Image: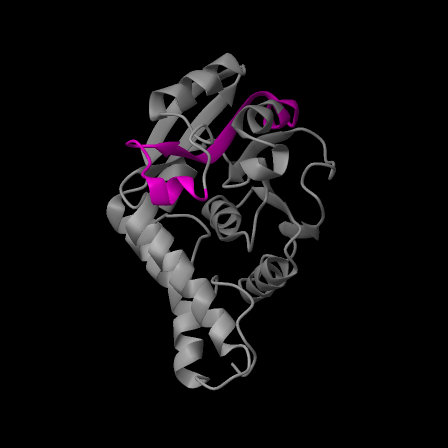
Amino acid sequence: MNDAPANGHAYLDFNSPLSDTKAYDLINSLAPLRDATVVDYGCGWAELLLRAVEHEAGAIGLGVDSDDYAIDRGNANIEARGLGERVRLDRADVTTWETPPADVVISIGASHAWGGTRRTLEAMHARLKPGGRLLLGDGFWESEPNARTLEVFAPDEFGTLDELVDLAMACGYRLLNLATATLDEWDSFESRWCAGRERWLLENPDHPEAAEARKIVDDHRDLWLKGYRGSMGFAYLTLARR
């Protein structure tokens, strides 16, 4: 890698704190997937979507994201895994991209695009068939955020876990499954995020963009270890649309 890394995704399997085992547990929670259309809003490189489609031979996947790097990576994975006839990724704004209501919808870490969790839940409700399943991945406060965390996140940006579930129920869903990221999953996610730039810096210590890359990763690591580690949680809610 000769150019400064564009982001910290190179060593990540998923762009959220998620292990392989939990990923398959979440996919199973979305059953039935036979002949289902699965749409991932804010899919990134769509690893979870690809695994869901691979899990059930009759499933079809659609993903949308505005990140060029992520879509390129996802399309390369689709080709390498022979899924070109069953999965399509579009580069677009998730809030304006349109497709018919789906059997299953995924929205993980994308609530910022809609302007918050409530608006995301409302938007996904309109994009699901009655009885369809939504996999929502969103943050919550496990404990009171400290001053370092509040330099970046507003105290009301997230609620508690029970408040997140109550909000989903109030927006027209029933809870089918609840899972939360473990501290090990968080540490793996954050370490891998940092590793892309750290490894590049080892190979390119005198690059003109080295100082900028070093600052980005140092700031991120400090926010993680001195800020939200242990106080910010991440929940995966499998919801049925009423």
In depth, the one of 167 and 79 nearer the eye is 167
Residue at the image position 42 percent from the left and 48 percent from the top: 16
Q: Is residue 222 left or right of residue 65?
A: left
Q: Is residue 184 above or below residue 214?
A: above
In depth, the one of 7 and 52 nearer the eye is 7
**Colour style of the rendered protein structure:** one colour
In depth, the one of 45 and 115 nearer the eye is 115
Whether residue 11 appears in this view of the structure is no
In the figure, residue 141 lies in which quadrant? top left
Residue 71 percent across, percent down from the top left: 62, 58
Q: Is residue 154 above or below residue 242?
A: below
135 magenta-colored? yes
What residue range appears in magenta? 123-152
Whether residue 173 appears in this view of the structure is yes
Q: Is residue 102 left or right of residue 198?
A: right
230 magenta-colored? no
